[in-house]
Amino acid sequence: MALQLWETLKEAITVYTGLSPATFFTVLALALAVYYVISGFFGSSDNHPRPRSVEEQMQPLPPPVQLGEITEEELKQYDGSDPKKPLLMAIKGQIYDISQSRMFYGPGGPYALFAGKDASRALAKMSFEDKDLTGDISGLGPFELDALQDWEYKFMSKYVKVGTIKKSVPVTDEAASAGEPAKLKKQMFPSLQKMVHQLMELWKLLRVLKPMSNIKM
């Protein structure tokens, strides 16, 4: 029975493939070998370790840290260049933790130049020029201010606020002129003290000399 089945199988192989049974099984074995090699090379990613960068991205982000009030210079430290620090950005003086959008605002991202800065003016104007990477929004038109407001609402709803930018108070001409009298007074005070001291010494000397002038020679 088995022999008859084998003879039937050989005839079928020859008829349908045009190959001898030995050649057919050789080709079949090679095809299986190639299949296993290729399937092992392009196997499921679940069976292979992921790159480190992907694993890091899949790890949960640490909770945002409240920084309080910091200067614009200190904010530059959070531009994404240090992966151990959170990624921060400010709008209208309010600082937000945008670490969850590192692929957009981190190094190499399309909006990377906004990170670590108050980019209010640039966002309002949709500008990527260095001169607009500032929190100064003076002179903007109503449409630009509306665009900036939309950005602010987006950040308020999506990201956590972690601080504010410390505003530096510029010294105006009036403030400088108001400080001049105090400065002049401070400079003159030692001289006045010295003059008073000299007058006191002179007064003591006169008191000593006055009785001597009454002595008749």
Image (spheres, rainbow, N blue to C red):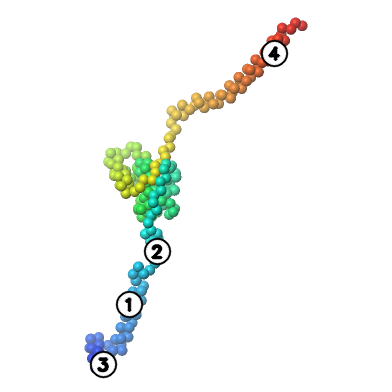
Q: Gap between marks 4 and 3, in whole Å?
A: 151 Å
Residue type beneath disc 2:
Pro
Q: Which residue is mark 4?
A: 208
Q: Is residue 63 left or right of residue 216?
A: left
Q: Gap between marks 1 and 3, in whole Å?
A: 30 Å
The disc, 2 or 1, on the residue closer to the chain's N-terminal end is 1
Q: Is residue 10 left or right of residue 102?
A: left
Q: Gap between marks 4 and 1, in whole Å?
A: 124 Å
Does dot 3 land on a helix, a strand or a loop? helix
Q: Nearer the viewer, mark 4 or mark 2?
A: 4
In the rendering, at what x and y percent does residue 135 appear?
37, 41
Q: Nearer the viewer, mark 2 or mark 1?
A: 2
Q: Gap between marks 2 and 1, in whole Å?
A: 26 Å
The disc, 4 or 2, on the residue closer to the chain's N-terminal end is 2
The answer to which of 53 and 140 lies nearer the viewer is 53
Q: Write the residue at 34% across / 77% down.
A: 36
Q: Contact, CB < 8 Å: mark 4 with mark 2?
A: no
**Label 1 crowd bin: few (<14), some (14–19), many (20+), radius 10 Å:** few
In the rendering, at what x and y percent does residue 118 appear?
38, 44
Q: Write the residue at 37% across / 52% down.
A: 99
Q: Which residue is mark 2?
A: 51
Numbered tag placed on residue 2 in the rendering: 3
Q: Contact, CB < 8 Å: mark 2 with mark 3?
A: no
Numbered tag placed on residue 35 in the rendering: 1
Residue 145 in sight in this render = yes
The disc, 1 or 3, on the residue closer to the chain's N-terminal end is 3
